[in-house]
């Protein structure tokens, strides 16, 4: 069974069970956001804490934005499940079938990049324009500008988590003609002596 790490789970982000209703998502989001804003107000802001705070706010904003709309939530969950199934299919392929590996690798790679770009970056920045989310998170243009580079880094981190599990690293064993190599080395060294 493939690990689900790297595929953003917004239910998990909000601490909800898979399939929790939109009302629950809104309620939990507001409670978590209120606590996060209070926590950051009580601490001294350093660049690292600011980055962590912005990323946490962005993740919560995206989670609420995706989960509060039934259609958006269903599309998100279907895309996520399809990627998890595709990863499991890829990992189950016979190692000697390189053509099948290449075919699924290309398809998977483009789909996972698209998924992460859409749900880590685009939805987060779009969520920052939602009135309900703006009121709860106090998100503004400065946060959005600062968040773009953080989200890009976060997206790449998730992408790398996924890639580390996949059979990208497996290289075909080289076919080396040792007799030919030996004769080449002898010729080269013979010319030096």
Image (spheres, rainbow, N blue to C red):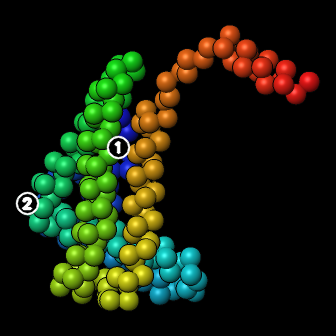
On-image quarter of the N terminus = top left
27 to the left or right of 4: left
Judge the density around disc 2: few (<14), some (14-19), many (≥20) Cα neighbours within 10 Å.
few
Q: Earlier in the sequence, mark 2 or mark 1?
A: 1
Residue 14 vertical position relative to residue 163 in the rendered view, above or below = below
82 to the left or right of 74: right
Image mark for residue 114: none
Residue 187 vertical position relative to residue 102 in the rendered view, above or below = above
The one nearer the camera, 160 or 185, is: 185
Residue 89 lies, in percent from the top left, at: 28, 29
At a point 28% along the width and 76% down the height, the residue shown is 125
Residue 68 lies, in percent from the top left, at: 15, 67
Image mark for residue 4: 1
Most distant residue in the right direction: 193
Write down the quadrant of residue 28 in the picture.
bottom left
On-image quarter of the C terminus = top right
At a point 55% along the width and 85% down the height, the residue shown is 45
The one nearer the camera, 12 or 113, is: 113
Can you see residue 24? no
Q: CA distance from mark 2 to mark 1?
A: 22 Å
146 to the left or right of 79: right
Judge the density around disc 1: few (<14), some (14-19), many (≥20) Cα neighbours within 10 Å.
some
- Residue on which disc 2 sits: 71
Most distant residue in the top direction: 179
Q: Secondary structure at mark 1?
A: loop
């Amino acid at each position: 069974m493939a690990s689900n790490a790297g595929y953003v789970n917004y239910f998990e982000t909000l601490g909800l069970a898979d399939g929790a209703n939109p009302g629950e998502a809104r309620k939990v989001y507001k409670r978590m956001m209120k606590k996060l804003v209070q926590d950051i107000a009580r601490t001294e802001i350093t660049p690292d804490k600011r980055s962590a705070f912005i990323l946490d706010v962005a993740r919560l904003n995206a989670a609420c934005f995706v989960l509060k709309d039934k259609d958006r939530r269903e599309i998100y969950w279907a895309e996520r499940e399809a990627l998890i199934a595709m990863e499991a299919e890829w990992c189950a392929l016979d190692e000697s079938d390189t053509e099948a590996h290449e075919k699924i690798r290309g398809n998977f790679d483009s789909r996972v990049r698209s998924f992460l770009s859409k749900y880590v970056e685009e939805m987060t920045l779009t969520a920052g324009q939602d009135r309900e989310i703006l009121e709860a998170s106090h998100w503004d243009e400065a946060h959005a500008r600062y968040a773009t580079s953080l989200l890009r880094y976060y997206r790449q981190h998730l992408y790398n988590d996924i890639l580390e599990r996949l059979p990208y690293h497996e290289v075909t064993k080289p076919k080396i003609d040792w007799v030919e190599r030996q004769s080449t080395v002898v010729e080269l060294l013979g010319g030096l002596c």
